[in-house]
């Protein structure tokens, strides 16, 4: 920068200080114009960003875009967890119409001028493997601000209910277990609960291959539409307490131990130890006997 010099040294000093101030202001102005736009504050959501979804099911999110300046450009793209993964069907709407879907090749872009709510959905394909995922990347940029947000859908296994011929549940489960070890492992677990007639629970990843592997099992009927949850089958995974169904005053028959075959009346029940105290009905002297609850059979209940 050129500088004007007068004949007065004091004036020269004043001019030097003035020009130094001007140079600092000019430098600050240049740095401000080259600084990147501030990031954050455009996107907001109350949903969990990462959600699990089973094959054939859809997961949804809601988010709001609040532009700081107008116009603001939003871009959308989908990134898969592995290169050979089947494509997920991803779509975006504003509540009234679809405005973007993953069928659009490359990166899609829309313009937003005012705060707006969006609805995003991702459908998990039937041919997924465990851990497959689709990450939807959303970016916002204007002349004065920028922001980004991503949502991720992760494939999880399904628990399906296979209907079988009555009293052939174990046979179907055994046959299915043998088929599960052939080729790619599509079946993770099989449950045939005692007392549940006509149904078998099957856990797997690829629902199409699950259906394929049950086609040739003659005593297997069909899968019930939809899927169940671990909470629904939890009662079958936790053995019921043997004291359930036994009440004080019940008449029971001892089915094991030295008094096997004897009848007795229930006097006391210990829930924690799963034991009951009984008195033999035909004994000369009524002596309390403590036995395990699973060693008796109720033959006359006080509740009936």
Image (cartoon, helix red, strand yellow):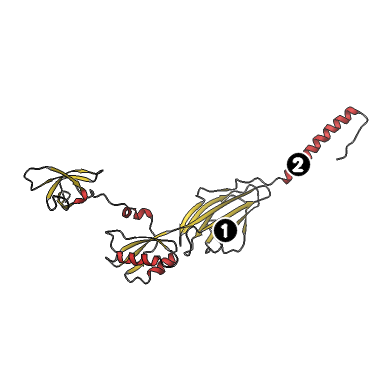
Q: Position of residue 92 (x, y in %)?
A: 55, 58
Whole-number angstrom distance, CA of label 1 to CA of label 2: 39 Å
Determine whether the residue tagged by mark 2 lies in a helix, strand or loop: helix
- Label 2 belongs to which residue? 29
Asked whether the viewer can see residue 117, the reply is no
Q: Can you tell which of label 1 and label 2 is closer to the viewer?
A: 1
Residue located farthest toward the left when viewing the structure as drawn: 284
Rate crowding at label 1 as few (under 14), some (14 to 19) or many (20 or more) other CA atoms within 10 Å. Answer: few
Query: In the image, which disc is placed on residue 79?
Result: 1
**Residue name at image x 33 percent, y 72 percent:** 218
SS class, disc 1: strand
Question: Which class describes the residues within 10 Å of circle 2: few (<14), some (14-19), or many (20+)?
Answer: few
Position above or below: 218 against 204: below
The quarter holding residue 75 reads bottom right
Q: Which mark is residue 151?
A: none
Q: Position of residue 284 (x, y in %)?
A: 6, 45
Q: Is residue 222 left or right of residue 24?
A: left
Nearer-the-camera pick, 252 or 262: 262
Quarter of the image with the N terminus in it: top right
Which residue is drawn at the image coordinates 59% and 54% (left, top)? Answer: 138
Q: Is residue 279 left or right of residue 134?
A: left
Q: Does residue 110 lie above or below 176 as drawn?
A: above
Considering depth in this image, is 250 or 280 the residue closer to the camera?
Answer: 280
| Callout 1–callout 2 Cβ contact below 8 Å | no
Q: Position of residue 141 (x, y in %)?
A: 65, 51
Answer yes or no: is residue 180 visible: yes
Residue visible at 77% across and 40% down in the picture: 27
């Amino acid at each position: 920068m050129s500088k004007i010099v007068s004949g007065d040294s004091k004036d020269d000093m004043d001019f030097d200080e003035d020009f130094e101030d001007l140079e600092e202001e000019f430098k600050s102005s240049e740095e401000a114009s080259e600084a990147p736009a501030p990031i954050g504050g455009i996107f907001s959501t109350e949903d969990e960003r990462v959600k699990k979804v089973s094959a054939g099911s859809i997961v949804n999110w809601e988010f709001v875009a609040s532009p700081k300046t107008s116009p603001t450009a939003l871009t959308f793209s989908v990134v898969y967890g592995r290169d050979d993964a089947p494509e997920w069907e991803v779509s975006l709407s504003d509540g009234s119409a679809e405005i973007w879907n993953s069928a659009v090749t490359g990166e899609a872009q829309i313009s937003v001028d005012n705060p707006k709510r969006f609805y995003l959905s991702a459908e998990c394909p039937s041919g997924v493997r465990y851990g497959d995922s689709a990450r939807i990347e959303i970016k916002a940029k204007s002349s004065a601000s920028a922001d980004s947000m991503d949502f991720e859908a992760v494939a999880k296994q399904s628990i399906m209910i296979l209907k079988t011929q009555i009293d052939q549940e174990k046979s179907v489960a055994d046959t299915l277990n043998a088929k599960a070890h052939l080729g790619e492992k599509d079946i993770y677990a099989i449950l045939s609960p005692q007392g549940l007639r006509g149904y078998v629970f099957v856990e797997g990843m690829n629902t199409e291959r699950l259906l394929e592997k049950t086609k040739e099992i003659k005593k297997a009927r069909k899968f019930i539409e939809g899927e169940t949850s671990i909470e629904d089958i939890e009662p079958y995974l936790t053995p019921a307490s043997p004291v359930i169904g036994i009440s004080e005053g019940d008449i029971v028959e001892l089915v094991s131990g030295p008094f096997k075959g004897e009848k007795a009346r229930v006097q006391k029940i210990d829930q924690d130890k799963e034991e009951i105290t009984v008195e033999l009905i035909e004994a000369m002297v009524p002596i309390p006997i403590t036995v395990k609850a699973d060693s008796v059979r109720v033959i006359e209940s006080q509740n009936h």
